[in-house]
Structure formats: C-alpha cells, structure tokens
Amino acid sequence: MAKLSFHGGAQQISGSCYLLETAEAKVLVDCGLFQCPRVCEAQNYEPFTFDPASIDGVIVTHAHTDHTGRIPKLFKEGFQGMIHSTHPTKELAHLMLRDSLGLMEREAEREGEEMIFEEEHFEKTFEHWEGHEYHHEFIIGDMHIRLLDAGHVLGSAMVEIIYKDESRAQKKIIFTGDIGNPPTPLLPPPEKISGANILVIESTYGNRDHEARDERKQKLERAIEDTVKAKGVLMIPAFSLERTQEILYEINDLIEHGRVPMVPVFLDSPLAIRATEIYRKSDAYFNKRTRYILDSGEHIFKFPMLKFTLATEESKAINDVPSPKVIIAGSGMSTGGRILHHERRYLPDPHSMVLLVGYQAAGSRGRQLQEGAKSVEIFGEEVPVRARVEKISGYSAHPDQGMLMGIVQDSIDTLDTVFAIHGEGESALFFVQRIRDHLGIRAFAPKLGESFDI
C-alpha cells in the first residue's frame, strides 16, 4: 500500500513538502521554506523528519521559495537523487535560491545564526536538476510522472503520478501545487484535470470567493488616478514572480489606452527585475493573446516613465523624484526587501496609498496593514499609518473556493480521497467540510507530520 506524508504546507501556507512512498520508490513533491513569524521559521533549521538519503527524487511544482527553499538542505543531509521540474521553474528557482542564499548569509553574519544550507549545496542542487516540457513522461521507480500546466506562475505545474497499488490496480494521484486564478494577463488557464483517485489540492482561499475579475483592473486604475490627484505615492508590495509582471502588463495597458495619467513608475526589486528578464524570453509559455501582442512587436514590460532600479543608489534616488509616483517593490507581504524603506517614508503621508495585490499571511506586516493597523514596526521604529490601504483580491494567483470546488468536482467519478493543503487551518478545514457536505467525498486537512495509507 502506498503512503502519503505531510512534512510542510499542512494547515499552513508555507513549507510545502509531501512524501509519496510506493512499493518501489520514495518521491518528494516540493521542499519549501517555512515563511512566517520566528517560531515557525525555526523549523527550517531542524533536521528533516524523514531520511533525505532514502528519497529517490524530488518533483518541484514551481519556483516560489515556499516550495523550493529547503531543496539544497536535502543535499546537505544526504540526498543524492535528481530534481525534476519544467524548464522555466529550474531557471527561476536558480534565481530565487541564489537570492535566498544571499539573505541567509547576511542574516547569519548579523545574528550569528547557522546557515540552512551553503554554497556547495546550492551548486549541487542545480547539478542534479533536470528540466522537462509539460506532458513529457518520466519514471522514478514504479511511478509514471507528468507535469501539467498549473497557470500559477511561469512554468508552474501540477504533478500527475500513476502507480499500481498492492492489487496491481492503477492509481492516479495529482498534486495541484499552487493553481492559477484565470483569466490572467500573461498565462493560459490551468489545465483541466480528471480521473484522479487521490487529489492533493491547495486551499489558500478555501473559505472565500474573490471579487469579480473585471473589477481588478478598474481598482488598479482608480488607485493610480487617486494617488496622482492627491500628489502622493502609490506603493505596491508585490511578489517577484508573476504578480510583478502582471502589474507591469496592466499598467502598460492602462497608459497605452490613456486610462491613467503618465506617471513615473519604479520597479524597485532586483529579484523582480531579474525575474522579468526571464519572463521576456519565455513567450512560448504565455497565453495566446499575449503571444499575439509580442508577435506584433510590442514590449509588454516596457513603457514610458518605467524605470528599473537595480542598484541600491538607484533605489535611494527614488526619494528625489517628486510625487506623484508609483513604486512596485518586494516583498509581497511587506516582511522584508526595499518596500520597507518606502513604507517607512510614506506610510505617515495621508496623500499616499498602499495597494495590496496578493495574499497577506497571518502575522505579516501586510496582514497588519490589511486589518487596519494604526501603526506598524519597521526597522525597530513605530511608523504611523496615515496612508490609505487598499486591497485587490482579483490579482491573487490562487483560485477562490468556487474554482477549487470545480477542480474537485471534475474528478468526482473517480475520487477516493481529497487532501487540502497550502492553506491556513481555518481555510483548509472549511474547504474540507464543504467537499464532504456538497460532494460526499472523503476529505482531510492533514496536520504537519501526519501520514495516510492511500
């Protein structure tokens, strides 16, 4: 009998790490960093709760560090197998993990902490990383594996694994990874999946629905117009992958069609700038509309008054540019990065605005702003919040409850069990109960460390 264990991303939205064991192989799907307040992040330093040397392979759904950040640590603790993903995921993961290594080195020096992994483990990771096209089948032991387009970020994949149980009956398990929230400006919608016997599905928004999709661009337009009129600063904390590129695409379109005034726009994130360069050369993975625009010779990540501020001195010089202006900077939950410098400067300004365009985890500074905090601590200083704080949920790269239920329903005739992962406890448990009540399917929201015979 196969066994499925949950070593991260269980009633939490980070640390994704799932171990599937069959008669002939042990495979990990993702191995990400725990990203949350210090109590949770301490788990990154603990030994794995399985033997990395016994793992035959790792399959990566996408490049975000909450899905990839502990892979080099696997090598540090004895893993010798191969890593598998799509080609863009490999390229973006190299960028993201290199950035993580740099952050860890600076933090280790500042705090006197040990490193989760070091340069040699980073290098070994990519010596053992193999890229695949969507739908190309590869085999690990008795597992036949394909990657399907998840539509979440560039190169993101759902993992389909077919194996035989102890009675030699064929079983199909699908790990959705993080699923896209269509329609999106750049990527095609997630592939339709069916015929799954076991479904391991994300539940980030398992207890809520998003606003109507056509409202999101209107809200972005209004945020820019209001900030320009007030002669303030529009700050957009944005994730480096996908969200930043989508926002640039949308602003380009708004400016091109005269729907917002010309205003200086700064992309102030070295990681996002480098990721955008990877996006520029990956047009084969875009949706049909975007490929058509690119074929016509248009630059979707380049428009008048857009400036990429790669160097620190360029970032500091943004302060000298008179308002109004738009600043897009990492991190997406205002937990670090250059956005903190801008928030410290402009949060006290009632003419300015913070626009939240992604999920804000519990305990993050972004969640505090979202929930109406009157002040937030930045660099040890209590900063008053007088700027407007607005949220656009339609830009989320995760589907809402309605779409998640539809994905489960597509396999209703074959499904034996659903596991809701990558969601805070309240969201995952609500989603599980809804599956049980409305679809009559066995469903669980596993806890960290739980194992199930499947």
Image (cartoon, helix red, strand yellow):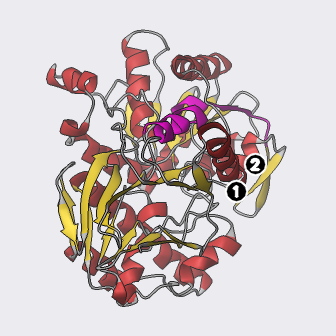
The answer to if 346 sits in the magenta stretch is no
Residue 322 falls in which quadrant of the image?
A: top right
Is 42 situated above or below 232? Answer: below
Q: How many marks?
A: 2
241 to the left or right of 34: left
| Disc on the earlier residue, 1 or 2 | 2
Task: Tell me, for residue 54, which label it has, or none.
Answer: none
* Category of crowding for the residue at label 1, using alpha-carbon neighbours closer than 10 angstroms: few (below 14), some (14–19), many (at least 20): many
Residue 35 falls in which quadrant of the image?
A: bottom right
Q: Position of residue 90 (x, y in %)?
A: 26, 60
Q: Is residue 263 at all visible to an observer of this figure?
A: yes
* Category of crowding for the residue at label 2, using alpha-carbon neighbours closer than 10 angstroms: few (below 14), some (14–19), many (at least 20): some
> In the image, what residue type sits under mark 2?
Gln
194 to the left or right of 228: left
Closer to viewer: mark 1 or mark 2 = 1
The foreground one among 388 and 216 is: 216
Q: Residue at x 65, y 52 (%)?
A: 428
Task: Give the labeled residue for mark 2.
Answer: 368
92 to the left or right of 175: left
Residue extent of the magenta highlight? 385-410
The foreground one among 108 and 416 is: 416
